[in-house]
Image (cartoon, rainbow, N blue to C red):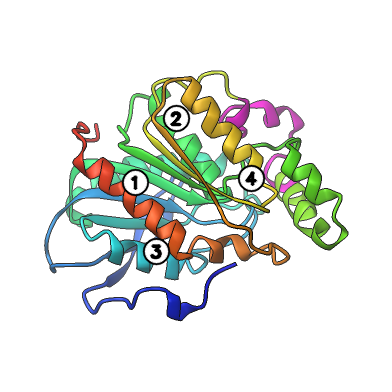
Amino acid sequence: MNKPAETLPTLSDQLKIRSLEVKGAEGPLAARLYTSGDAGAKRDMLLVFFHAGGFVGGDLEDADMFLRHLADDSRQMAVLASAYTLATEKPFPAAVEDAHAVLMWAKKNKAKLGWTGKQLLVAGIEAGANLAAVCALMSRDRGGPGLAGQILVMPMLDPGLSTGSMREIQADPELLDVADACAKAYRGYLPNAADRAHPYASPLQSSRLKNLPPALILSAEDDPLRDEAEQYGAKLQSCGVDTTIRRMLPAPLKDTEARNECACRCIALEEIASFVAGLDRSETPPAK
């Protein structure tokens, strides 16, 4: 789904990537910190990012190139990519508890991250975007940390696989493996059928979406997750949440790993950079 690498800007020699450990709900997790610009400068904004993989796979390598460009494009922001417990080890709610714990860890370890603590964002792709959306709900429900924004790239939000775009792709023999991969992922993540209605598993089904941070939601024209992403954005808007919804141009999704590549496209990077710049100009209170 990605454009050729030469269409992306050249990465600067000021880009720095550092491996570190963060604290999850039950133990340490691998993480990477991406920064660009003046060495040693503290950033007012930190974006915590969760990778794709359908809850059952994926790692920090998946979106590495995307995050390199993201950090290089938005130098006022540090980007922290964190692993989380995969469903093959422990199913729901292990991953979401890890994700929220990482936000809490970041709040307590500002100096280690070169972050002033002023603005905290959460983001992810596919399953990682589910975790990002749920982190916004958990942070509201649990009294913190305060979030300045949420960025959801082709999010998995509907375990029922009931939207129109999902049904359309199930009817296409060439793309049936994509729908099958989504169903298999949810079976692994939510083996207890009752959990599929839990708002921390299925944000799209939540009836409490008020008082959430501003959102950027990116869908793709022929992604089976398109409709659930856009429906969630519409629900956020109806609840008074400042939400930007953008649909990216059609691109083949025969490779179930393509969502990670799609996020590296220039248009997605531009949308995210614009959203981040708008938050940077806002008077968001420091993360609590």
Residue type at mark 2?
Met
* Upstream in sequence: badge 2 or badge 4: 2
Q: Is residue 149 left or right of residue 2?
A: left
The quadrant holding residue 178 is bottom right
Q: CA gap, disc 3 to disc 1? A: 16 Å
Position in image of residue 196 (x %, y %): 69, 31
Residue 129 in sight in this render: yes
Position in image of residue 5 (x %, y %): 47, 78
Q: Nearer the viewer, residue 193 or 52?
A: 52
Residue type at mark 1?
Phe
Residue type at mark 4?
Arg
Q: Nearer the viewer, residue 147 or 23?
A: 147
Q: Nearer the viewer, mark 2 or mark 4?
A: 4
Q: Which residue is mark 3?
A: 67
Marks 4,3: beta carbons within 8 A: no
Which circle marks residue 275 in the picture? Answer: 1
Q: Nearer the viewer, mark 2 or mark 3?
A: 3
Q: Which residue is mark 2?
A: 138
Q: Is residue 131 left or right of residue 201?
A: left
Residue shown at the point (62%, 33%) measured from the top left: 202
Residue type at mark 3?
Leu
Q: Which residue is mark 4?
A: 226
Looking at the rendering, the stretch of residues picked out in magenta corresponds to: 187-205
Q: Secondary structure at mark 3?
A: helix
Q: Nearer the viewer, residue 280 or 117?
A: 280
* Upstream in sequence: badge 3 or badge 1: 3
* Upstream in sequence: badge 4 or badge 3: 3
Q: CA gap, disc 4 to disc 3? A: 22 Å
Q: Nearer the viewer, mark 4 or mark 3?
A: 4
